[in-house]
Image (cartoon, rainbow, N blue to C red):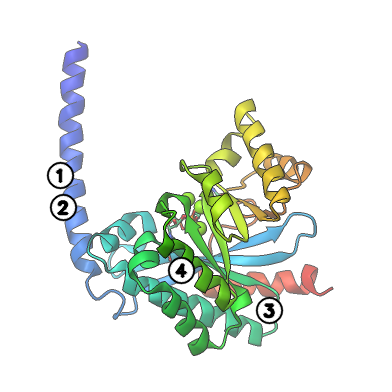
Amino acid sequence: KAKKSGRCQYRLFSQDLSIEADRWHSLSNDLHGACDRGEFVLYYQPQVAIGTSKVVGTEALLRWNHPKLGIVEPSLFIPLLEENGRMIEVGRWVLTEACHQNAEWQARGITGVRVAVNISAQQFYRGDIVSSVRTALEDTGLEARWLELELTESLTLEDSEATHRIMGELKALGVKLSLDDFGTGWSSLGYLRHFPLDGIKIDRSFVRDMLEDQNTAAIVQSVLDLARQLNLECIAEGVETEEQLAHLRDSHCQVMQGYLCRAAMPPEEAAAFLNEYFAQNQAA
Ligand code: C2E
Ligand code: MG
Ligand code: MG
Ligand code: MG
């Protein structure tokens, strides 16, 4: 019986795979020229200081507005873009668009809110990231201190001369550097030791499990203590419940990001959110 259901599963699985493969293939084709056709859009998710409830930043999250499928999540197309190096070009667009949006919001009175942009490994090592960032800042007039670059831990930053040089040059521009998805890779402590980081983002898998699992809770607490000692700002990702927020507050985590506040929003909605938030909380 087990064998039969096993075969069944196998058949189902392989069928799924071929559907997946077809979809993959057509998505990949559709991606050609998507940037030039203006099909990419940035959504923004608020980052809120836990102590004061002020919005301290927004993370720009890439979406693809597919002509037939509608909004497509980055996990479905970023790997396709990375496959043949096209993420570098899209990444440049993301940087410029995020800086432009932030500068525009500042001109409309939404000040003191930085913007965080995700940087892929490809962009970091092969995309001439320093000049891309410099150009984006110059073209949009955004002050560097309002831009934060999120480097994911899975980017496997090499402890190489190139990494140090690039990070040093980015810091010299005045942008902030943070380590995304902290705790999911193997080299976290080494990164903290060697790289000039300003912040870390505790991966949402830790936030998800910390109230149920004592080991996770202990790790989160230790990471927060460590971050404080190292003078790093700590952002908790994926905060979904009041209980999680209360726990993070008790543990002295500075900033939260997650559905509990808002999911990532299209630009107009994000602007409306920020305006309303400003009117209520931020004025002082
Ligand atoms: P990330 O940088 O870790 O971004 C956080 C992800 O968690 C986002 O998914 C966000 O929508 C989601 N999230 C936020 N709050 C919650 C929550 O409370 N619960 C849950 N379950 N999820 C939450 P998204 O937008 O699908 O992005 C996925 C990943 O794609 C990002 O992870 C980032 O690594 C990558 N990405 C997104 N935009 C860009 C980009 O412009 N460039 C690059 N290189 N990567 C990007
Ligand atoms: Mg991120
Ligand atoms: Mg993350
Ligand atoms: Mg993530």
Which residue is rendered at x = 22% and y = 67% of the image? 30
Q: Secondary structure at mark 1?
A: helix
Ligand 1 has an atom within 8 Å of the beta carbon of the residue at disc 1: no
From the top left corner, tell me how far across and down residue 144 is, in percent: 59, 78
Quadrant location, the C terminus = bottom right
| Nearest-to-viewer mark from 4 and 2 | 4
CA distance separating discs 4 and 2 = 39 Å
CA distance separating discs 3 and 4 = 31 Å
| Nearest-to-viewer mark from 3 and 4 | 4
- Residue topped by disc 3: 110
Horizontal arrangement in the rendering, residue 117 relative to residue 109 (left or right):
left
- Residue topped by disc 1: 18
Task: Categorize mark 1 by other alpha carbons within 10 Å: few (<14), some (14-19), many (20+).
Answer: few
- Residue topped by disc 2: 22
Quadrant location, the N terminus = top left
Horizontal arrangement in the rendering, residue 21 relative to residue 85 (left or right):
left
Please tell me which residue lies in front, 197 or 283. 197
CA distance separating discs 1 and 3 = 48 Å
Q: Secondary structure at mark 4?
A: helix
Which residue is rendered at x = 17% and y = 14% of the image? 3
Amino acid marked by disc 1: Ser
Q: Are marks 1 and 3 in contact (CB under 8 Å)?
A: no
Sequence-first disc among 1 and 3? 1
Sequence-first disc among 4 and 1? 1
CA distance separating discs 2 and 3 = 44 Å
Q: Are marks 1 and 2 in contact (CB under 8 Å)?
A: yes
